[in-house]
Amino acid sequence: AQKIRIAVTPGDGIGPEVVAEAVHCLEALRSRHNLPMEWTRFPWPSHAWHEENGESMPADALDQLKQYDAILLGALGDPGPVDDPDRYLLPDSISLAPLLDMRKGFDQWVCERPARLLPGARQYLADERAKDIDMLVIRENSEGEYVGQGGRLRKGSPDEVATQMEVFTRRATDRIIRYGFEQARLRAAARAEEGKTRHFHTRDGKTCESQVCIVTKRNALRYWGDMYTEAFEELAKQYPDVATHHELVDAACMKFVQAPWAFDVVVASNLQGDILTDLAAVLSGGMGVAPSCNLNPDDPSMPSMFEPTHGSAPDIAGQGLADPTAMLFTTARMLEWLGRKNPAIAAAGRELYDAVAADLAENAGTTRGTQEIGKAVRDRLK
Ligand code: IPM
Ligand code: MN
């Protein structure tokens, strides 16, 4: 079989610590199952690379990364020494843009952020039904509020005006909504297989086994909201087996806290999805367990990128305190994704997922270090 190649970019802060555990698990899986995969470590993008080279990554970074089947990324961003009062004032030259450059450069238009409260994960909501939280937030990852268009007029003067444009295309809207419907079907099928059917009611009295909820701010952001809604209604006709639902983003925030177990698949714009997924991460155990991935589902020549929802957490970096669980779930998703070409690699992804979930379930409420958790997971791999 053709060798799968992974670019490992540990990044900043806790990134290298949690990535080290992920790589140990990859090593264990590779040697036990003789998997045809290899990886190369890149010291960029990172703050350290920037300090030395004046840029976040080499000019040909995307060309180099394009040679790989996937990118496994730790976390980016480093605000500097803890005792520096200006640490959160990033100089102009430093940005978190490399992450966005990769998403854009490889057209990773889907950001998948599952939020499932697994046994053993911290339950922030007191309500018992929180145990049923199991949603997949799909964030549009290619445009919207993140197009980076706009500017500052009369910069620095009292009359300054900053504009920040949002651009939504029908093409990108259609593809992300369609992706949402497809995921809803897959989730319903997976649940049926496990005998755990869920029911969602539609306005016309039907009952479906899955649901897609789109999020907009249609009552205030008219043009985008209307186009999104029309695209949704049009595509829904092709998925009569999937219940449809529409929330305004402010109400969605409220309902995420009030009754998050009622959601299945949620499709949101780039920025609104960004915000909703931090909230969803907390609903399902916190940043320490929340996986994420940036996918290009239709061009196999473009690597997808796998990075947890969490950031570089500079306040706990270098102390071995970071929970690698999110990184390990993210790595499991990467293997499952790469396994589209190789069933043995997909199986390794499921094995890793099961090991991380079992470790979580058996260690509820304990405080363990990064390496301790990594080793416990590794010891569970067959
Ligand atoms: C995320 C992060 C990024 C984003 C930042 C670092 C640019 O918050 O991946 O959720 O906004 O997409
Ligand atoms: Mn974010």
Image (cartoon, rainbow, N blue to C red):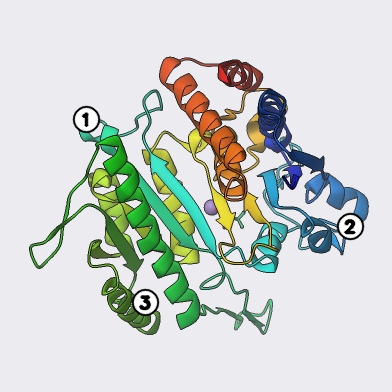
Mark 2 / mark 1, whichever is N-terminal: 2
Any part of residue 154 in sight = yes
* Residue 103 image point, x, y percent: 64, 62
Any part of residue 331 in sight = no
Tell us which disc is closer to us: 2 or 1.
1
Q: What residue type is labelled 1?
A: Glu
Which residue in the protein does label 1 denote?
128
Residue depicted at 31% across the width and 81% down the height: 230
Q: What residue type is labelled 3?
A: Tyr
Front residue of this view, candidates 225 and 336: 336
- Estimate how packed mark 1 is, as few (under 14), some (14 to 19) or many (20 or more) residues with alpha carbons within 10 Å: few
* Residue 112 image point, x, y percent: 49, 53
**Image mark for residue 52:** none
Front residue of this view, candidates 337 and 51: 337
**Image mark for residue 54:** 2
Q: Is residue 381 above or below residue 170?
A: above
* Residue 272 image point, x, y percent: 44, 62
Q: Is residue 77 above or below residue 29?
A: below
Q: Disc 2 on helix, strand or loop?
A: loop
Q: What residue type is labelled 2?
A: Gly
Mark 3 / mark 1, whichever is N-terminal: 1
Which residue in the protein does label 3 denote?
228
Point out the image quarter for the C terminus: top right
Is 159 placed left or right of 17 in the picture?
Answer: left
